[in-house]
């Protein structure tokens, strides 16, 4: 007796399962549910699904640290490999790049670096550090954001941990303006209980709508002539100063 041909509906259902399994390999921390694989356990396609799941699990074991930085993001053991952290360009700044988490985190952190370069002091190669391996940062402190690709340190040798007053007053005003412009989704280490004035990191959890909205605004500024980093900004404007001061008070209370 010959086998009946596979219907188009059943074929598409099988294909959807395989696609889901394959996609799971590229999503950090994703866990492919057992139920779809179980549903096709007797299906000829099930071996393909099982292999995809196995590859995804191996990838997660290799990349993920099974812990989170203090700001709530997944820590990764590697960069520029199979994870979410890669070396990204910083347009207009003479750096080879900075290792940060792809997506909205990249957008806002790169914007911070650019404005620092244009408005605080010119940066040179080696002045900015992004991702650091988990065993090179304290996991119980804000610096752990580096290990999740959600923070950068700018001139850490100029601004040692524990010291305050490394910036001139007008430079602090620029920092405050940058933070307010980004709607508080970035926090400055200078506001932490143990200060690190070189550190800037994501201050909201993954999937926070405020980060997505702010990153979209940054992309819009970049694509609009006369907007974005490098464009002259009146940091003394009353509305900007008011927003900067309000955010400073909020961040200091949260320290």
Image (cartoon, rainbow, N blue to C red):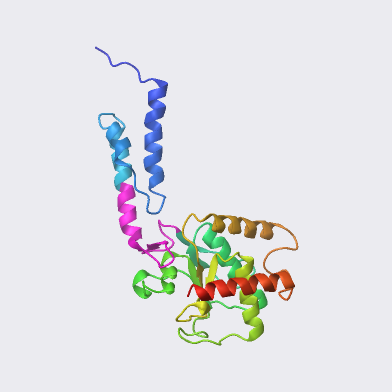
Q: Quadrant of residue 97?
A: bottom right
Q: Residue 73 at x, y = what percent? A: 42, 61
Name the residue nearer the viewer: 180 or 40.
180
Q: Quadrant of residue 149?
A: bottom left
Could you tell me if residue 233 is visible in this image?
Answer: no
Q: Residue 252 at x, y = what percent? A: 53, 76
Q: Give left or right: position of 38 versus 248.
A: left
Rendered residue at 61%/65% (across/down): 182
Q: Quadrant of residue 226?
A: bottom right
On whether residue 80 falls in the magenta region, the answer is yes
Counting labels gives: 0
Name the residue nearer the viewer: 36 or 123.
36
The image shows residue 76, relative to residue 237, as above or below, that is: above
Q: Residue 92 at x, y = what percent? A: 65, 69
Q: Give left or right: position of 195 versus 222.
A: left
Rendered residue at 60%/78% (across/down): 123
Q: Residue 143 at x, y = what percent? A: 43, 74
Location of the N terminus by quadrant is top left
The image shows residue 163, relative to residue 53, as above or below, that is: below
Rendered residue at 49%/87% (across/down): 163
Could you tell me if residue 195 is visible in this image?
Answer: yes
Rendered residue at 68%/72% (across/down): 242
In the rendered image, the residue lying farthest to the top is 1
The image shows residue 82, relative to residue 199, as above or below, that is: above
Residue numbers of the magenta segment: 55-84
């Amino acid at each position: 007796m010959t086998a009946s041909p596979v219907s188009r509906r059943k074929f598409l259902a099988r294909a959807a399962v395989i696609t889901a399994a394959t996609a799971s390999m590229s999503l950090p921390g994703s866990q492919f549910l057992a139920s779809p694989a179980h549903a096709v356990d007797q299906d000829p396609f099930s071996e393909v699904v099982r292999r995809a799941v196995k590859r995804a699990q191996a990838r997660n074991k290799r990349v993920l640290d099974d812990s989170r930085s203090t700001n709530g993001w997944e820590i990764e053991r590697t960069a520029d490999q199979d994870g979410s952290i890669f070396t990204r360009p910083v347009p207009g700044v003479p750096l080879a790049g900075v290792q940060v988490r792809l997506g909205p985190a990249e957008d806002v952190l790169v914007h911070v670096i650019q404005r620092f370069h244009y408005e605080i002091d010119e940066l040179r190669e080696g002045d900015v550090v992004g991702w650091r391996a988990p065993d090179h940062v304290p996991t119980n402190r804000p610096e752990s954001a580096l290990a999740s690709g959600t923070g950068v340190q700018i001139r850490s040798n100029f601004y040692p941990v524990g010291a305050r007053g490394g910036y001139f007053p007008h430079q602090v005003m620029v920092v405050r303006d940058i933070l307010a412009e980004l709607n508080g989704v970035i926090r400055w280490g200078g506001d932490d209980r143990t200060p690190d004035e070189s550190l800037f990191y994501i201050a909201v959890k993954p999937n926070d709508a405020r980060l997505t909205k702010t990153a979209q605004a940054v992309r819009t500024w970049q694509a609009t002539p006369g907007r974005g980093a490098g464009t002259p900004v009146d940091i003394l404007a009353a509305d900007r100063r008011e927003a900067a001061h309000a955010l400073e008070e909020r961040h200091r209370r949260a320290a």
